[in-house]
Amino acid sequence: MQTTNIIEIASCVFKYPQSQRIILDINPFHVRSGGHLFLHGKSGSGKTTFLNILCGITEPLKSDIKILETDFSNLSPSQKDRFRADNYGTIFQQFNLLPYLSVKENIALACGFSKQKAYHVSDMEEEIERLMIALDLTSTLLNKQAMHLSVGEQQRVAVARALIGAPKIIIADEPTSALDSDAKESFMKLLFTQIEAQDSTLLFVSHDKGLSSYFQADYDFSQFNRALS
Ligand SMILES: Nc1ncnc2c1ncn2[C@@H]1O[C@H](COP(=O)(O)OP(=O)(O)O)[C@@H](O)[C@H]1O
Ligand SMILES: [Mg+2]
């Protein structure tokens, strides 16, 4: 079977408008379908900026990026928003749950924004329950507001929200930074089991090199970003 490239970056350059300094100048690279890419690098090296560009949240100065065989660089901002909602599950450092919504509503919301994700879920209640069990979350949390969850619970709800609807790409930005080392280990195992079960491609960014053992290869972000050399 031929393995396809999910992400192909020929170039990606970024600077803040009010500054002269080039923050990103990415070397060409690709990520294969089902691949797990671990990018680590010093704080301030541009990792979050890079993920925000891949998410269409930040506009680069210049780029040539293909994602899922789509010419991502030439999509309009609203097309990028749609593309992200349909094809990505994202887990951010602060988890970004909506505090007043329940756990169930937070998870279901990902499908509310995407017909493509909703299409993959035949029974919403059942799928949320399945993810909750898989991520070691008790079902008594289902109707609890997100603001009343512990950090570990928020993190796993954020993962359930990222996984629902089986998006092709999961993007995680420092998702373990608020956890102690035992919680980190069980989180990584849960994340990998689920990602492998739904055959998603993972882009995982962290400054914590200790997490590299979960990946086949670890990459220093400076290898990708020639603006740092
Ligand atoms: N609004 C901004 N204006 C100018 N520089 C910024 C702004 N936001 C972030 N930066 C700079 O961009 C660089 C990359 O930041 P970031 O992508 O958050 O790095 P990382 O995620 O690797 O810690 C840092 O040097 C940071 O100081
Ligand atoms: Mg960051």
Image (cartoon, rainbow, N blue to C red):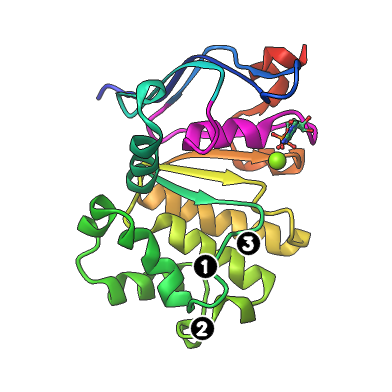
Tell which tag, 3 or 1, sits nearer the viewer.
1
The residue that mark 2 highlights is: 141
Q: Are marks 3 and 1 in contact (CB under 8 Å)?
A: no
Badge 1 marks a residue whose secondary structure is: helix
- Figure label count: 3
Q: Reply yes or no: does residue 129 show up in magenta.
A: no
Question: Is 211 located above or below residue 120 in the figure?
Answer: above
**Image quarter of residue 20:** top right
Given residues 84 and 215, the one toward you in this image is 84
Residue at figure coordinates x 47%, y 54% from the top left: 193
Q: Is mark 2 within 8 Å of ligand 2?
A: no
Q: Residue at 52% of width from left, 67% of height from top?
A: 157
Q: CA distance from mark 2 to mark 1?
A: 10 Å
Q: Nearer the viewer, residue 94 or 136?
A: 94
Vertical arrangement, residue 4 with respect to residue 137, above or below? above
Residue under label 1, please give it. 157
| Residue type (three-letter) at the residue carrying disc 3 | Ser
**What's the magenta region?**
32-59
Q: Quadrant of the C terminus?
A: top right
